[in-house]
Every structure is written in structure tokens, then in C-alpha cells.
Amino acid sequence: MRTIGLMSGTSLDGVDAAWVETDGERIGRFGPSLTLPYDPALRRDLRRLLDMAGELPADDPFLLDCEQRLTERHAEAVEKLALEADLIGFHGQTILHRPVAGKPGEGRTWQIGDAAALARRLRVPVAHDFRSADVAAGGQGAPLVPVFHAALVQDLPRPLAVLNLGGVGNVTWIGEDGQLIAFDTGPANGPLDDWARRATGEDYDRDGRLALAGLPDGAVLGRMLAHPYLAAPPPKSLDRLDFDRALREAGACDLPPTDGAATLVTFCACAVAAAARHFPVPPKQWLVAGGGRRNPALMRALAGALPEPVRPAEVVGWDGDALEAQAFGVLAARVWHGLPLTFPGTTGVPAPLAGGQLTGVNQPLVSIEA
């Protein structure tokens, strides 16, 4: 199938779109990809939604307006890509993630985005709602991309770890025999972006300049590293705001701008190092994707915290900016074919589980033109 995967992660910076040829198990080839940033107003409103989501009804006018604007931006990304496709993989924007491990029906994960409107506008079937079935079955609902990582690394020395640094960090450990262990490592760009916005007015710490100019505060860092999440065994996953209260209580918000940024960067790297304690054996290398790999301060901190080589995804020929969008192109094909999306070692679901929904499957396929 020719698919276009769409991803808007917890960094809230925009939409990634990527074309993939795949049957859901193998990758024939990757095509072009792009990133379409959110305008400042949409990014601000989505960030506001994160704070409100726990109290909002599904028909709240502000939420519905954000959802419409978000969906339109995703449609614009597909149209700008201007490539023929059989299927769209539409993750939407996570505004709340509250799984309850091992308790079917008690958790909740909420991604906004109007798949039906997207399918109507593009006249292409849309696979969506990738997480709900897993959470309903008592799984974490995240991370979803490990099965895609497994397809990517078949010709690479294993075991290895694929680390994605978005708003939240997540890792996939892949063993020599293909065993998968995956979970969220802890906060990554999310609190650092919020910090940079408060301190400088910028949307993120450009080139890591803020963090590189400061020093981590040892006392604050020690309190942050005592958070029970880091020691808890996987499967486990996080909401974008899960650590906000802990960071405040640890005193991170009282630090000077540069030292606060340096402390958050060091905490992210130490959380990744703590995650490695849950692997059966150490990886031969860490391959880093997501926006965090572009932050020199964060990559330097990772190299200091991990004994194995830490390299950006590009060293093995991957596109670290497009990787998650490509993953949702592959996951869309898996939804189409009824293949499992999640596994006991990735989300804690009791058995390999298919998921997702399809919208617009009876619509004629067309070439998408800008």
C-alpha cells in the first residue's frame, strides 16, 4: 500500500507527514516527508488544552474549534506533500493520557482530530484511534512505534535501543532474537520547551544555548531523580504533564533561566540512563530520533550519562524528523490488514492486539494535489 503517516507529538510544534510503501510488516520504500509547523495561536491553544483536558466535555466549543483547526492543518500537510496514497495514518493530537495498567476499561487516552472530516476533504481512507483498544484491554496505549522500529533494524547489530525525544521520551529495546521492550523514559522536550518559553519567549531552547550556558543544580536534580516513575518497571507510559508538579515541588521553577534549562536537560538524560536498567542486556548503541537530537546540550548530556555510543538516527540512514510519521504510515497498513499494533513487551497488553479504526473506506482513491 501507499500510505501517508501523520504525526503531531507532545512537543506541539506541528505536523509531520511522510509517504511510505508498506504492507504493514515490511517496508518497500520511503518517499518524501515534510513538517508543517503550527501557527503560534494554535500551538498556544493546544498547550492550553493540555491543562484543561481533564475537566473538558467532548463537546466543549473551545476544544471543538481546536480540533477543527488541527484537522485542517493535517489536511494541509497531506495536500502539500502532493503524492498519491491509498491510506492515511492519522494519530491526532494527544491531550490526555491516563492508562491504568492491567485494569481493562479503567484507563483513558484522548487524541483529538476529526478523521471523518480528514477523509472527506482528502477523499482517501483514514486509519485512526490507534491507542484506545489497547488501553481498554488494560495496556498502556503507548508507545506504538516499536513494531515499526523492529522492521527498521533487521539488518543492524542487536541488541540496540531506539530513543525518541519528543515532548516525552520513549525507548524501544530490540534484542538479538527480536524481543521488544518499550516504554516512556520520562520528560524530554516538553518541560524544556515550556521553560524556554517562560524564560525567553522562544518556543524552544534553540541550539541548546540556554542549557549550555548554565549548570545543573545538584539538589534539585537529586529530588527529581527520586521520582518513583523512574524506578518502576515497564510497561509504563506518561502524559505530557505528568512531571509538572514534581518539577515544581523539586524547586526547578525557582532556578535561574540557564541553570533551570541545564537541570532539565540533565534530568532527561539521567531518566534515559535509569531506563536502561530495565533492559535484559545493554544495547550496542543508542539511535536517537525526534526533535531532541537537534539539541546539542541534550545529546552531550546523553553521551555523558550512557556508556554506549549515542548517535542520531541519520547515521544508519534514517530520517530522524520523519520517523514517527513514517511509523504511522506503517501502522495504518497494519490497521487495514488487522495486524497487531501492541504487544505484552511494549504496552503490557495481555496478548498481541490489533487496534485502530478505519474511516472513509468506501471512498474512491484519488491523487492528492496541493
Image: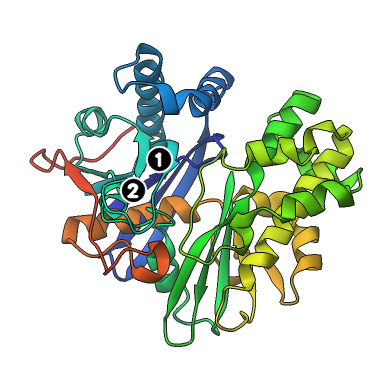
Relative placement, left or right, of 207 versus 22 is right
Name the residue that disc number 2 marks: 4
Location of residue 354 in the rendering, given as x and y in whole percent from the top left corner: 23, 60
Q: Is residue 309 above or below residue 322?
A: below
Q: For the residues labelled 2 and 1, say whether their Cβ atoms are less than 8 Å apart.
A: yes
The quadrant of the picture occupied by the N terminus is bottom left
Judging depth in this view, the residue of 105 and 309 nearest the camera is 105
**Mark 1 crowdedness (10 Å alpha carbons): few <14, some 14-19, many ≥20:** many
Residue sticking out furthest to the bottom: 177
| Residue appearing at x 65%, y 44% in the figure | 189
Q: Quadrant of residue 138?
A: bottom left
Location of residue 50 in the rendering, given as x and y in whole percent from the top left corner: 50, 29
- Asked if residue 210 shows in the view, the reply is no
Name the residue that disc number 1 marks: 81
Question: Residue 19 bears which disc, if any?
Answer: none
The quadrant of the picture occupied by the C terminus is top left
Relative placement, left or right, of 225 versus 7 is right
Which amino acid is tagged 1? Leu
What distance separates the C-alpha of mark 2 from that of mark 1?
Answer: 9 Å
Closest to the camera, between mark 2 and mark 1, is: 2
Does label 2 or label 1 sit earlier along the sequence? Answer: 2
